[in-house]
Image (cartoon, rainbow, N blue to C red):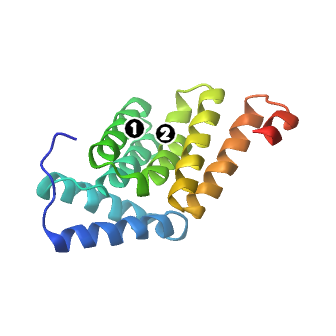
Amino acid sequence: SDHHTMEDENRLIAMNMMRVLLVMSFMGKPALFVLITLKMVQWSIYYGVSKNSSVAFACYGVLICSRMGDIEGGNKFAKVAMSIVERFGAKDIESQVLFVCVSFISHWKEPGHLTHKRFLRAYEVAMQTGNIHFAMLSMRGSNLAALLAGKPLAYIEKE
């Protein structure tokens, strides 16, 4: 995250468009998800980082975990992603980055109760910023993590 900042307006617009496409391509066209992720990471390295780079590095962490089986490496990229969110104060995409990191990376290392709490954090941020899509995904993840951690339904309902 100490890398220089992307300044080219056209590349910034393209990075934002690629970030939006990542969501759709993940389930619909996984090969496209990989290509978009790699292009965003490449641009972030060559042309500088932007707030959208945080999503790219989170998704790259997913690829490192899922395709290469490198849980430690994936977690390092999740931390890079979160540091970029902090660097840019990117509240508007923080919930997306949190959701990706918690759903596909950090759950391999964290206990279930921490996963549950991180999903709740993603939900709260998403609701504060009006991102209903990631709010609902995060709430679903939170409920599932709580159930898997052995929390009773009455406890989950109260939260």
Q: Nearer the viewer, residue 147 or 26?
A: 147
Residue farthest to the right? 154
Q: Quadrant of the C terminus?
A: top right
User: 65 or 11, which lies in front?
Assistant: 11
Residue appearing at x 69%, y 37% in the figure: 145
Relative image position of residue 98 (x, y in whole percent) = 48, 45
| Residue appearing at x 56%, y 41% in the figure | 121
- Mark on residue 74? 1
Amino acid type of the residue tagged 2 in the rendering: Ile
Circle number at residue 105: 2
Q: Are marks 2 and 1 in contact (CB under 8 Å)?
A: yes
Label 2 element class: loop
Q: What is the spatial separation of the Cα atoms under label 2 and label 1, in whole angstroms?
A: 6 Å
Q: Residue at x 31, y 39 (%)?
A: 83
Specify few, some or many for label 2: CA neighbours under 10 Å numbering under 14, 14-19, or 20 or more. many
Residue 137 higher or lower than 13, as above or below: above
Q: Position of residue 70 (x, y in %)?
A: 41, 34
Q: Is residue 92 left or right of residue 35?
A: right
The vertical placement of 112 against 15, above or below, is: above
Q: Residues within 10 Å of mark 1 (few under 14, many from 20)?
A: many
Front-lying residue, 106 or 136: 136
Give the percent coordinates (x, y) of residue 103. 56, 44
Residue 10 falls left or right of residue 28: left
Disc number placed over residue 103 in the picture, else none: none
Is 56 left, or right, of 101 in this rendering?
Answer: left
Label 1 SS: helix
Q: Is residue 123 above or below residue 150?
A: below
Coordinates of residue 18 in the picture (x, y in percent): 34, 68
Of the two numbered discs 2 and 1 on the same chain, state the one appearing first in sequence.
1
Tell me the kind of residue under disc 1: Gly
